Image: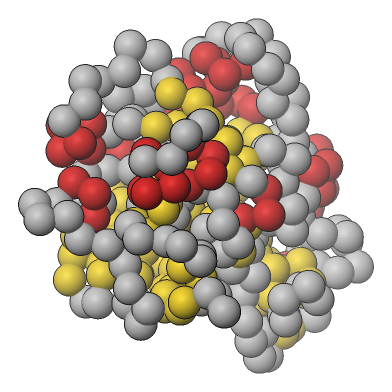
Amino acid sequence: MKLLRYGPAGQEKPGVLDEQGQVRDLSDHVRDFAGDGVSLEALNTLRALDLSQLPLVAEPGRIGACLASVPNFYCIGLNYAKHAAETGMAEPAEPIVFNKATSALSGPNDPVIIPRGAEKADWEVELGVVIGKEALYVSEADALDHVAGYCVINDMSERSFQIERGGQWVKGKSAPTFGPTGPWLVTADEVLDPQNLRVSLMLNGETVQDETTDDMIFTVAQIISHMSQFMKLVPGDIIATGTPSGVGMGMKPQRFLKPGDVMELTIDGLGTQRQETVAAE
């Protein structure tokens, strides 16, 4: 299934794409896509529905983030070999885990706001993993059994906040609109191999990131298993699994976003995002 949320910000309704690519309203069957609403049990209930009998949404309008909210917004740093190389950093021995503020979550086509004081706003297309079943001390072999689905994420970063200021990376990752997510939550049964997906980002029509998830240092299964040794992952948690090479920080000379820039992100089978950057008021 390709699940989505449509409507004005703060008033989104849950929907699903039918076989013809049309949006069908799921409001009578699920309150929203968040927490237990994206548990494996909840998704199995939705699979039993006859989509052709659901109300057709002729003009869905704006598409919101595919999740209404998230208990935790986790990220994995330096997880593509070529990206680690472009930064001049050694490949990590185990996954680098950090957080984004959950308030960074935004729609896939909403404007990205460059925050006040920003100097080095950067783009990062990433494969997002949504947890559908509690995961604690799970093995790598069982890890993917805990996945509800996958989505596109732009793990927006303000490098001066992230690297040049004190403290942890979260400060450079968490501005409002720094977590465009969607357009769809694609259930795990539609993604045969999360390590064989093409991930790309165009900036003002120029392809700057283009790689496959095969370049990941740690696979999705390894990430989930590793994280579950230290914390309990719960339904609705989202994990951004790292970005490939081609970020502005890694370019020579470095290149960063300015108001009016347009980013277009695509992952095989998971849809496309498009954001224009604007300056904070």
Left or right: 251 in relation to 280? left
Q: Which residue lies furthest to the bottom in this view?
A: 59
Residue at the image point whose x is 63% and y is 12% from the top: 230
User: Which of 47 and 126 lies nearest the eye of the viewer?
Assistant: 126
Q: Give the image location of residue 273, x and y in percent.
A: 44, 68
Residue at the image point whose x is 57% and y is 19% from the top: 227
Is residue 94 positioned above or below 104 on the image?
A: above
Residue at the image point whose x is 43% and y is 23% from the top: 96
Left or right: 88 in relation to 11? left
Q: Give the image location of residue 10, x and y in percent.
A: 78, 73
- Is residue 207 something one can see in this rendering? yes
Is residue 197 positioned above or below 271 on the image?
A: above
- Is residue 266 something one can see in this rendering? no
Quarter in which the N terminus is drawn? bottom right
Residue 257, quarter of the rendered image: bottom left
User: Which of 181 and 196 lies nearest the eye of the viewer?
Assistant: 181
Which color scheme does this rendered protein use?
A: secondary structure
Residue 49, quarter of the rendered image: bottom right
Quarter in which the C terminus is drawn? bottom right
Q: Which residue lies furthest to the left in this view?
A: 252
Counting the numbered discs, the total is 0
User: Which of 163 and 232 lies nearest the eye of the viewer?
Assistant: 163
User: Which of 153 and 173 lies nearest the eye of the viewer?
Assistant: 173
Q: Give the image location of residue 106, x and y in percent.
A: 61, 64
Q: Give the image location of residue 201, x and y in percent.
A: 29, 61
Left or right: 246 in relation to 131? left
Residue at the image point whose x is 56% and y is 50% from the top: 174
